[in-house]
Image (cartoon, rainbow, N blue to C red):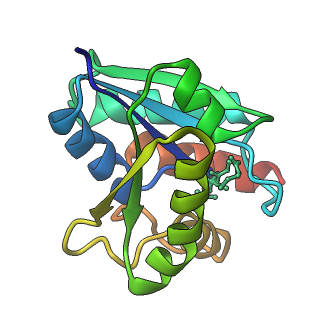
Amino acid sequence: MKHIAVYPGSFDPATLGHLGILKRSTKLFDEVHVLVVHNPSKTPLFSSSERLNMIKQSVRELGIDISPIRFASLETGLLADYAEVHGACALIKGFRTVADIEYELPMSQVNSDLSGVETVFMASEPGLGYVSSSLVKEVANLGGDISKYVTQAVATAVKERLDAN
Ligand code: PNS
């Protein structure tokens, strides 16, 4: 039986923390769907397709094996339904701090109620626990160097988008 996981998030943009979780999750599952999900509580800098393209480019740039990864987006509807329709047994959630767990725990329980899908929590890599998409955007917006936190593909895209705005 093929073990499929879904790694959902806003990924606006994906950081090296996200990409580390994605890489590690491919060691645990046969197939991992990285799923760009529309989060109505956030105003994204990039469209879903731009975010997916940046993840693809970053996977290539970092030499991560792309073969077990599927790239998709979810504009509406439940994550639990996406998981069920695609035969996924698990959702992957990265956490950096206890605050992340507090935010994620109720969602994992609701997702389990909805479709029985498990949530697998993966701790962020040492050294990347403080990196978030919003901080990356803030640093870039104020003229700071984000190259320690994101791939070259993402750094270029963020710079171009902020310069255009
Ligand atoms: O990167 P983010 O913004 O923290 O990701 C949060 C996200 C998009 C994964 C979360 O908001 C989510 O799971 N949305 C899907 C909508 C859904 O199914 N909601 C109901 C049960 S939690």
Vertical position of residue 41 compared to residue 40: above or below: below
Q: Position of residue 158 (x, y in %)?
A: 61, 51
Q: Position of residue 102 (x, y in %)?
A: 51, 80
Q: Position of residue 138 (x, y in %)?
A: 63, 74
Q: Position of residue 59 (x, y in %)?
A: 33, 32
- Quarter placement of the C terminus: bottom right
Vertical position of residue 95 compared to residue 51: above or below: below
Label total for image: 0
Q: Please tell me which residue lies in front, 45 or 98.
A: 98
Instruction: Decide if residue 135 is on the left or right side of residue 124.
Output: right
- Residue 101's quadrant in the figure? bottom left
- Quarter placement of the N terminus: top left
Picture residue at 35% right of the left edge, 59% below the top: 17
| Residue 26 seen in the current view | yes
Q: Please tell me which residue lies in front, 31 or 136.
A: 31
Picture residue at 52% right of the left edge, 74% below the top: 144
Picture residue at 69% right of the left edge, 32% below the top: 74
| Residue 150 seen in the current view | no
- Residue 70's quadrant in the figure? top left
Which residue is most to the bottom? 98
Vertical position of residue 53 compared to residue 131: above or below: above
Instruction: Decide if residue 36 is on the left or right side of residue 129.
Output: right
Picture residue at 53% right of the left edge, 44% below the top: 8
Instruction: Decide if residue 136 is on the left or right side of residue 162.
Output: left
Instruction: Decide if residue 161 is on the left or right side of residue 159.
Output: right
